[in-house]
Amino acid sequence: MTAGGRAEGAEPDAARPASRGARVLSALFYGACSFLLVLVNKALLTAYGFPSPIVLGIGQMAATIMILYVSKLNNIINFPDFDKKIPVKLFPLPLLYVGNHLSGLSGTSKLSLPMFTVLRKFTIPLTLLLETVVLGKQYSLGIVASVFAIILGAFIAAGSDLAFNLEGYAIVFLNDIFTAANGVYTKQKMDPKELGKYGVLFYNACFMIIPTLIISVSTGDLQQATEFNQWKNVLFVLQFLLSCFLGFLLMYSTVLCSYYNSALTTAVVGAIKNVSVAYIGMLVGGDYIFSLLNFIGLNI
């Protein structure tokens, strides 16, 4: 964080490697935020039957913009003011960001939590591949082997899914691609001498909230959301607001984890978190159909 008019590139810790504590804490923070958001979104989209994942995404973008802008006004954080070079510096992050956001929300409502988490494992090899191609990183044979072990378990579990949903599978695979690309390009764009981590978050949300709102209006999605019959339910409204705030925390923690670690670390932390999500979905989700092979694959 910075104070006054100091640029984020002037942060005292920007030039030196992050401590082990910062790397571990940022990874734990990301895992906790991701875990909580999946559960809250699942309740809103499935238990309450909220019809619009796009409006939920808009709420999360709006929360991100407001929190970061107020923080900047109060000198809690700092990021560059807008200029005509910022869109060029950000591209293609805004497109990847909104694609990741909306496909993730839609996928949550189409599949049971355990199967959703299984299919999300494919983010990991995609991230490894993109980091190698885009960032030029090289990984050891042990890391590559462990990634393919995770994928083996995912294939076993998905192959025995008793509630197969082609649309749900397609959306989640698309979400995997967006997540991997978003993580790798975010790592690339977070140069503290340019936008920095707060600038990436803020301008991503700013550039995509209006197009997303236009899509929501043109498809009738916004009308469905405004006509939803639970807006007078205080518990629903509180959970909707909680989802918006957790959406901001997830975006921030994702950037933080990638900033201090790597995009692959962020993807693997997400997979570890998904173990807990899968077990909770089995116990309380009500939409998991048990089979021995599926259960073995989940655990692998």
Image: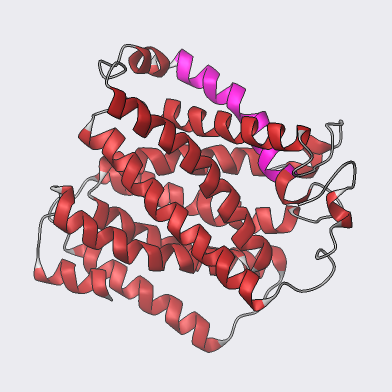
In this picture, is 151 found above or below 115?
Answer: below
Q: Nearer the viewer, residue 38 or 249?
A: 249
Q: Give the quarter of the image for residue 279.
A: bottom left
Magenta stretch, residue numbers: 199-218
x, y (%) of residue 78? 80, 43
Q: Give the quarter of the image for residue 242.
A: top left
Q: Residue at 74%, 54% (x, y): give it.
A: 190
In this picture, is 211 found above or below 188?
Answer: above
Q: Quadrant of the C terminus?
A: bottom left
- Chief secondary structure of the magenta portion: helix
- The answer to whether one can see residue 167 in this image is no
Q: Does 131 lie within the magenta span?
A: no
Q: Residue at 25%, 68% (x, y): give it.
A: 298
x, y (%) of residue 229? 25, 15
x, y (%) of residue 178? 52, 49
In this picture, is 49 found above or below 218?
Answer: below
- Whether residue 73 sits left or right of residue 141 in the image: it is right
x, y (%) of residue 105? 39, 39
Coloration of the structure image: secondary structure
Q: Nearer the viewer, residue 275 or 189?
A: 275
Q: Nearer the viewer, residue 133 or 197?
A: 197
Q: Residue at 56%, 47% (x, y): give it.
A: 251
Report how many numbered discs are placed on residues in the image.
Answer: 0
Q: Does 213 lie within the magenta span?
A: yes
In this picture, is 289 found above or below 141?
Answer: above
- The answer to whether one can see residue 74 in this image is yes
- Whether residue 274 sits left or right of residue 175 in the image: it is left
- Whether residue 77 sits left or right of residue 299 in the image: it is right
